[in-house]
Image (cartoon, rainbow, N blue to C red):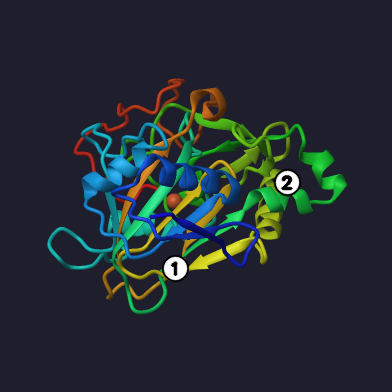
Amino acid sequence: MQPTVAPLNATLGAKITNIDLGNMDDAAWKVVEDAFHEHAALVFSGQNLDADTQVGFAKRFGNLETLNPDGKPTAVAITNKKDDGSVLKSDDFRYKTLRGNEGWHTDSSYMPLAAKASILYAQVVPPEGGETEVADMRAAYKELSQDMKDKISNLEAYHSLYQSQAKIGYEIKTGSAYGYHTKGAPRRPLVKVHPVTGRKSLFVGRHAYEIVGMDKEEGQKLLDELVNFACQEPRTYSHKWEAGDVLMWDNRCVLHRAMPYDYNEVRILRHTRVAGDPNSELVPTGRDDRASDFIASSSNFNDYYESSPKSLSEST
Ligand SMILES: [Fe+2]
């Protein structure tokens, strides 16, 4: 079976058909890996993945991030369905995380080691809404004016999940879930060079909140301006889910967001997150004034739960 790669109608993304992600030979895997680097986002449909198979597929790209409180690198559910079968209400903790996911972001930019790739597998989807959208930060960078390229070429921004949640009205305490840690806010360049392709991309999104050496408001204004410019057609693709679909993207050069849907309808996506390479995705951190403390660390590992850890299913 020879996979077929068809680019989507955007500057990023391709759909790969004629492939079973749970049963690939080396040649098929090479097609997937090459397409991932070239197109930055990939769509597959009609897959039938159990959790272990999804984890096995994800591990082809690298080590998994340990999103679960038990520290095991497994898949997690991104869902509005609670364990008792009911759906989240607006005062539920995980509701706030799902709402946060509706802002353009890149996964784990608020951790010392940012993510390489994110993989979503649709198990239950609502009849309307709930799309996942991706935006091409390579093309966005390329389309910036030369003045803007010059302006941002040496700028860095701090990233924080506390801060991005605070921007939408949620004040979250240290230790509440993955991402609410005392390791400090990572300081990341606004222009990222892709470690494999060498291409430059904009590295921004909702978790970026302060530009080093710039007035706070001015910095946030510039960050917002960049995201608003970047996340426009033809640099965006909106994925309308069907059960059995897989969507994955390269967090090093793609922003993504969830679209709203009626929370009376259940949506269950299974998520695996591939960790970045410390050589290219690990950065120093600085004090985050919304965290309870600052204990600089270069590890993402699970020492961030103070007590009764919440399910991590909804980390953004
Ligand atoms: Fe996300």
* Extreme residue in the left direction: 84
Q: Position of residue 143 (x, y in %)?
A: 78, 54
- The answer to whether residue 183 of the structure is visible from this angle is yes
Name above or below for residue 103 compared with residue 303. below
Please name which of the two marks, 2 or 1, marks the residue nearer to the observer.
1
**Element under label 1?**
loop
Front position in the image: 170 or 48: 48
Q: Secondary structure at mark 2?
A: helix
Q: Residue at x 50, y 44 (%)?
A: 163
Q: Earlier in the sequence, mark 2 or mark 1?
A: 1
Query: Which residue is at the far front?
Result: 1
Residue at the image point whose x is 27% and y is 33% from the top: 305
Distance Cα–Cα, label 2 vs label 1: 32 Å
Q: Quadrant of the N terminus?
A: bottom left
| Amino acid found under the numbered disc labelled 2 | Glu
From what the image shows, is residue 281 above or below residue 40? above
> For mark 2, what is the residue?
218
User: What is the x, y in percent for residue 43?
Assistant: 45, 59
Identified at 59% across, 45% down, the residue is: 253
Q: Position of residue 12 (x, y in %)?
A: 60, 57
Residue 284 appears in the figure = no
Position of 35 with respect to 231 (left or right) is left
Within 10 angstroms of label 1, few (less than 14), some, or many (20 or more) residues? some
Question: Whole-percent x and y of residue 79?
Answer: 29, 60
User: Contact (CB < 8 A) between labels 2 and 1?
Assistant: no
Instruction: Look at 23% across and 63% down and name the residue there.
Output: 81
Amino acid at the residue labelled 1: Glu
Picture disc at residue 288: none
**Residue in the foreground of this view, choosing between 52 and 156:** 52
Disc 1: which residue:
131
Q: Which quadrant of the figure has residue 111? A: top left
Q: How many marks?
A: 2
